[in-house]
Image (cartoon, rainbow, N blue to C red):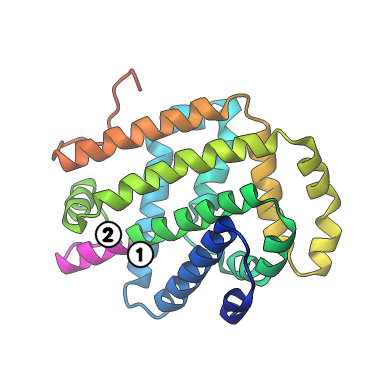
């Protein structure tokens, strides 16, 4: 809807250009995916993935100090569906973002958009591999998931996804320690509603609140990254129970 606004906005730094690039790429992916015959299968894969992540990291998920942060990661940053209006709003306010936000925050936003796009692309790749090899996304079993994972042959992109999760997580941790940001988010609810940006404001406020309540986000992110790298190695090696983790992780 707002592609032309993205294209016509003048940017004056590498980080602003990166954010513009990834917003355009994500905009085009969303537009193309809205008519993709595998859209439903991709959504089913995404739902399966979100449930798997909760199950794999259930011990962390049940830890009071981590629960809210993980819930935000799995329902907002990794959201199977329902965020199109929020994403349209990000496109809409892009000219103001590059004008008013500090450059280092534009870099973090660019990484977030890249992560969101890459995650959805990987889900689509899995759905395509399942379809090509006559496996069901609706009744997805672990064995079929792992076979499709290997068929998709996108390990390089998956390593990039893990790298982005680590980078974004550590950056967000630094931002939420800023009390001024929390005050601005609290004060900004009314103006956001007046500008029809309440879903974007709610997303930012939930993220701030979730990360703010965690004492050690860095440790959580590092454990998640190590675990997911271990699982990827298990799947590629053809392990029969790839999601089982050693006690050391």
- Whether residue 136 is in magenta: the answer is yes
Q: Are marks 2 and 1 in contact (CB under 8 Å)?
A: yes
Viewer-proximal residue among 97 and 32? 97
Give left or right: position of 117 versus 233: right
How crowded pointer 2 is (Cα within 10 Å; few <14, some 14-19, many 20+) is rated as many
Toward the viewer: 197 or 177? 177
**Residue 140 percent location from the top left of the image:** 26, 55
Mark 1 Cα within 10 Å, few/some/many (few <14, many 20+)?
many
Which residues, given as a range, are shown in magenta?
124-139
Q: Is residue 71 left or right of residue 38?
A: right
Quadrant of residue 63 within the rendered picture: top right
Residue 231: x and y in percent read 28, 36
Q: Look at mark 1 in the image and give the residue it sits on.
A: 42
Name the residue rendered at 33%, 58% in the picture. Answer: 122
- Pointer 2: what residue? 126
Farthest residue to the front: give it: 12
144 with respect to 23 (left or right): left
Q: Residue at x 61, y 78 (%)?
A: 8
Q: Where does the image place residue 249, in percent across and percent down from the top left?
A: 35, 23
What residue lies at 21% left-to-right and 58% top-to-bottom?
152
């Amino acid at each position: 809807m707002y592609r032309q606004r993205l294209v016509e906005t003048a940017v004056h730094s590498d980080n602003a250009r990166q954010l513009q690039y990834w917003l355009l790429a994500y905009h085009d992916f969303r537009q193309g995916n809205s008519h993709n015959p595998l859209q439903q299968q991709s959504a089913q894969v995404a739902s399966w993935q979100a449930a798997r992540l909760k199950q794999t990291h259930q011990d962390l998920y049940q830890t009071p100090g981590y629960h809210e942060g993980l819930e935000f990661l799995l329902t907002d940053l990794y959201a199977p569906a329902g965020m199109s209006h929020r994403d349209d709003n990000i496109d809409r306010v892009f000219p103001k973002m590059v004008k008013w936000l500090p450059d280092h925050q534009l870099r973090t936003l660019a990484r977030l958009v890249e992560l969101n796009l890459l995650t959805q692309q990987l889900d689509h790749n899995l759905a395509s591999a399942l379809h090509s090899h006559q496996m069901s996304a609706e009744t997805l079993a672990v064995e079929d998931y792992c076979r499709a994972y290997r068929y998709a042959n996108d390990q390089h992109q998956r390593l990039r996804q893990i790298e982005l999760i680590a980078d974004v997580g550590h950056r967000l941790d630094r931002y939420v320690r800023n009390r001024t940001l929390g005050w601005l988010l609290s004060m900004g609810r009314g103006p956001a509603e007046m500008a029809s940006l309440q879903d974007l404001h709610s997303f930012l406020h939930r993220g701030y609140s979730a990360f703010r309540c965690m004492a050690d986000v860095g440790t959580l992110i590092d454990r998640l990254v190590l675990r997911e790298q271990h699982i990827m190695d298990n799947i590629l090696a053809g392990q029969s129970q790839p999601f089982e983790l050693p006690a050391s992780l």
